[in-house]
């Protein structure tokens, strides 16, 4: 898939802060040790270091951890395109595990395919990344999200 000019740009500072602040409130991402590494309009990257706490019995990053960061990458990619008063919830996603999630870390990339007033569809990709930058696609999928209004405080 070709990367568009908008996906190469950084999101505005306000959008970056809103997205990062929301990500920082996610207990699961903190627990896993995931971090957001790129925020642009309609595209977000999340990295998860490979360490024993996130692996399965063969030493690969567990499918649950792989799926979790893919889900968050897509959700935050969608949020970059929503108005400030909006939040996002996943309606559903399908992920295909293509190869063992091996490497020094895995990187999930969420890319908005279609942003609508209510529903948004994202592409999800997860790569195993080794030292030196060697990358291998280990999972891909699609996600549907719903835009909701931020709850009153």
Image: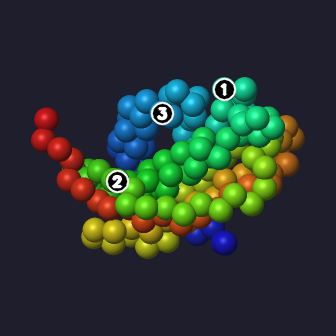
Query: Alpha-carbon distance for marks 3 and 1?
Result: 13 Å
| Residue located 37% across and 47% down the image | 15
Q: Which residue is mark 2?
A: 89
Q: Residues within 10 Å of mark 3 (few under 14, many from 20)?
A: some
Q: Secondary structure at mark 3?
A: helix
Dot 1: element = helix
Please name the residue that numbered disc 3 is placed on.
28
Check disc 1 and report the residue beneath it.
Answer: 53
Quadrant where the C terminus sits is: top left
Does 90 appear above or below 23?
Answer: below
Number of marks in the rendered image: 3
Q: Residue at x 27, y 70 (%)?
A: 117
x%, y% of residue 41?
A: 46, 58
Counting residues from the N terminus, which is met first, the one under dot 2 or under dot 3?
3
Residue furthest to the front in view is 57
Q: Is residue 72 above or below residue 36?
A: below
Location of the N terminus (image quadrant): bottom right
**115 sits left or right of 64 in the view:** left
Give SS at disc 2: strand
Residue 37's image quarter?
top right
Q: Is residue 71 visible?
A: yes
Whether residue 44 can be seen here:
no
Please tell me which of labels 3 and 1 falls first in the chain: 3
């Amino acid at each position: 898939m070709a990367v568009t000019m908008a996906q190469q740009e950084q999101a505005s500072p306000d959008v970056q802060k809103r997205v990062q602040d929301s990500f920082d409130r996610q207990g699961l991402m903190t627990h896993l040790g995931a971090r957001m590494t790129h925020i642009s309009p309609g595209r977000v990257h999340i990295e998860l270091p490979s360490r024993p706490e996130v692996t399965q019995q063969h030493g690969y990053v567990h499918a649950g951890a792989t799926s979790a960061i893919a889900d968050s990458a897509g959700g935050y990619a969608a949020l970059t395109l929503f108005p400030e008063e909006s939040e996002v919830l996943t309606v559903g996603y399908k992920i295909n595990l293509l190869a063992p999630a091996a490497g020094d870390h895995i990187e999930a990339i969420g890319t908005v395919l279609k942003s609508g007033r209510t529903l948004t569809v994202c592409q999800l990709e997860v790569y195993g990344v080794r030292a030196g930058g060697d990358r291998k696609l280990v999972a891909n999928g699609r996600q549907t999200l719903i835009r909701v209004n931020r709850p009153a405080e």
